[in-house]
Amino acid sequence: MNLENTRVINWRTAQQACDLIKEKDNDTGITRFYIVKLANGEKIRSLKSGRKLLVDFDSLIAFLQGTEYEFEAKQIKI
């Protein structure tokens, strides 16, 4: 199997994503609740299994920057 062109998705919990953003900007207004609302509203790409929610961190950053993202913003339920 050739893994050279394989892209790894940066799945993070909403809290982990929030923490990563706050590392870069301690005064940010982005909260865990806001990230969950974006995921549930299908504004960013996310994965939901039962109550567990993971967000595609790159999709979140693209949304916040107002740029295009290579994958469709939707919530995948498993």
Image (cartoon, helix red, strand yellow):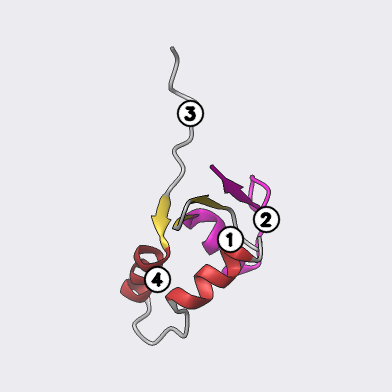
N-terminal-most mark, 2 or 4? 4
Q: Residue at x 51, y 70 (%)?
A: 35
Q: Are marks 2 and 1 in contact (CB under 8 Å)?
A: yes
Rounded to the nearest whole Å, what is the CA distance between mark 2 and mark 3?
20 Å
Q: Residue at x 34, y 64 (%)?
A: 16
Relative vertical location of residue 17 with respect to residue 52 in this rendering, above or below: below
Q: Secondary structure at mark 2?
A: loop
Relative vertical location of residue 74 with respect to residue 31 in this rendering, above or below: above
Residue 21 lies in magenta, yes or no? no
Q: Which residue is mark 2?
A: 68
Q: Please state the horizontal and vertical placement of residue 38, each as a whole percent of the image.
A: 59, 68
Q: Which residue is mark 1?
A: 62
N-terminal-most mark, 4 or 1? 4
Among all residues in the image, which is located at the extreme top?
1
User: Dot 2: within a 10 Å radius of its alpha carbon, few (fewer than 14), some, or many (20 or more) residues?
Assistant: few
Q: Which residue is mark 4?
A: 18
> Residue 54 shows which numbered tag?
none
Q: Are marks 3 and 1 in contact (CB under 8 Å)?
A: no
Q: Secondary structure at mark 1?
A: helix
What is the span of residues highlighted in magenta in the rendered image? 55-78
N-terminal-most mark, 2 or 3? 3
Q: Residue at x 34, y 83 (%)?
A: 26
What is the three-letter code of the residue carrying label 1?
Ala
So how many labels did they put on this image? 4
Q: Secondary structure at mark 3?
A: loop
Q: Residue at x 47, y 52 (%)?
A: 50
In the figure, residue 43 lies in which quadrant?
bottom right
Rounded to the nearest whole Å, what is the CA distance between mark 3 and mark 1?
20 Å
